[in-house]
Image (spheres, coloured by chain):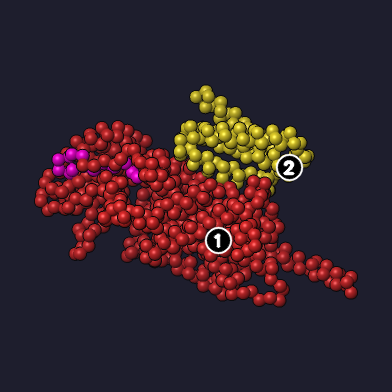
Chain colours: A red, B yellow
Amino acid sequence: MKESFFRSMTWMHTWVGLLVCWLLYLIFFAGTISFFRDEVTLWNQPALHNAQAPQERISLQRQQIIAGVDYLKTAAPESNRWGIYLPQERESQLIYAYEKPRPEGKRFGGWQEHYINPKTGESLQQPRETKGGNFFYRLHFDLHYIDVRTARWIVCFASLFMLVALISGVVIHKRIFKDMFSFRKNKGSRSWLDSHNVSSVLALPFHIMITYTGLITLIFMLFPYPAMTAYEDGIRGLFNDVTPTNVRTKSSDEPAPLTAVESVLDQVYTNWPNADLTQFAIKDPNKASATITVRASTGTHVRDQTPTLLFNGVDGSLIAKSVDEFSSTEVFYDSLTALHTGRLANPLLRWLYFLCGVAGCVMIATGCIMWAKRIRERMKKDQRPSFGLKLVEGLNLATLMGLPLATSVFFLANRLLPINMIERADKEILAFFVTWLAVALFALFKRAKQQWILLAWVNSIACISIPIVNALTTNGNIISYLLNGQWALFSFDLVCLISAVLFIVQVKKLRTHRQASVSNVRPSRVAKNKLREQSA
Amino acid sequence: MSELLQFSLCLLAFNCFALAKFNHYRDVFKVRPTQKQSNQFVIAAWISILLSLVLSVVEHKGYGGLLFCGYMALSVLLLMIFYSFKASWVKFMSVINITTIFLSGLYISVF
């Protein structure tokens, strides 16, 4: 251990941060995109681009549910589950869905969805198969290709390291308020340190909140022992206890007529007079075990658990209702989860979340680069770089430049892969990981400034290509989105263009630095020679 | 409009915090600030930031606290860009900032 408190904190900040920085970058990057999960999914499904929620969205919900149940009664009378997903501000299409027949030995047969434009009432074309924003959402904590539980443990450890790095960072940053607005450009590693500090400090409350709440969302996996002691069936028992609507009914084959939907809706609106409903689901319709679940939006309340009502599907009686008033521990857990997911956010807050997420990515990226840069600066001229330095430089290039490129390729694959391709959604994800692997292999062999410049060019071209390919393969483009007020789609294309510009700026900066470093060699050598002459 | 007022107050607060610092004040006005001026900037900054927080929380409760954190991040980012790359523009930015506060405040009080 180092000799002073400050030095040991600096040591801890450096190593705790460096060990997991690439994984943290992936988590932050995917998490930042996930704030716009629904918007990204919408962009990935051009068939739904023209669906618009009507202005009187909430007042139409009752009518839409009744029409939906009528449709499902005709389309899938034998199905085990029906679902009606009502248009929301961020997901404007109306969906009537039913479960397809279950294959032998399977517990779920998958959903067959029927999309409707709620404004016109017309059926929409079946959208292309894609994971869209959900891919980034799952990648954020499930890491893909890894067993889910293992992945979540890894993410939790990385988050814990991040929290330690954040706290030690605050401790070692002596001039946290004095240097709050300072960024000294063109000063080598000093500039990198400034950008690391500024990106950390400007969103410090967000960084601490998002890391801490991230750990809290998975707290029952990390620390299940109190629940295991108190409940016979452990965590499941705890969740069933705090969620009264988690009632499991045994499926029956005995036929029974479905209760009148109107009477159920009357009860719903008596309980919640101004409810903004999101979902109306029926399990085992036309059977004695039928149940109806109705969910409502939480709006902008700092609450994650959706208000839910559970009805008997045969006699229409209310079986269970989600609690309106939480206990203090429930409020603590639920509100922290809500803060992390940001589902409560309106567009303004969502963009602020996004901005802070980008600041987090910059903070991690500058931290990784700074370590390698400082080691390089300390090296003597004839000294060969160590394996550790080469590894860090390779991982920096592979992660910091590879991940944005892989993301661009994911979106390009969405537009360019044949629409009827088998397992299309998986192919998009494969394109993402193959691109990332290719960049990693490239970084394995060469990772000098020239490779950074090359990858920055490739990234800028990929980012520009997204709106262009979108315009060529769909009926819309960035200008039509602007004119029609399709803000989610317009913002997506605009962010791609801004990213392309930023990569071009990166190329310009890297080239300037290279030229500066070449031109700086001679004067310093001349000065050294002069000193030698003087000393001689 | 109330969000604009809350953000403008937050931006003004951080601008005052920045101007209370010797080096930032000198970058903008080319002269040294007196101790009294620095103190006045700090007091103005605290009043403005508290007003921004109170308005956010009163209007949106817990959600307002989150918005306020976002406003702080955006304000610091904007000011960092101005002070590091275009310090001479800070005067104009400050005028626009104060005008926005007055106009948005007037709009809220009238409508």
Cα distance between the residues tagged 2 and 1? 33 Å
Residue A216 to residue A443: above or below: above
Secondary structure of residue under mark 1? helix
Pointer 1 indicates a residue of which chain? A
Q: Position of residue B103 (x, y in %)?
A: 58, 29
Residue A4 appears anywhere in the view: yes
Q: Nearer the viewer, residue A122 or A428?
A: A428
Residue A134 appears anywhere in the view: no
Q: Which residue reaches farthest top?
A: B110
Pointer 2 indicates a residue of which chain? B
**Disc 1 designates what residue?**
A17
Identify the residue at image location x=57%, y=55%: A168
Quick check: marks 2 and 1 in contact, CB under 8 Å? no
Say left or right for A204 vs A248: right
Residue A317 lies in the magenta stretch:
yes
Q: Position of residue A96 (x, y in %)?
A: 26, 47
Identify the residue at image location x=20%, y=64%: A105
**Disc 2 designates what residue?**
B22
Amino acid type, label 1: Gly
Identify the residue at image location x=26%, y=45%: A245
Say left or right for A482 vs A526: left
Amino acid type, label 2: Phe
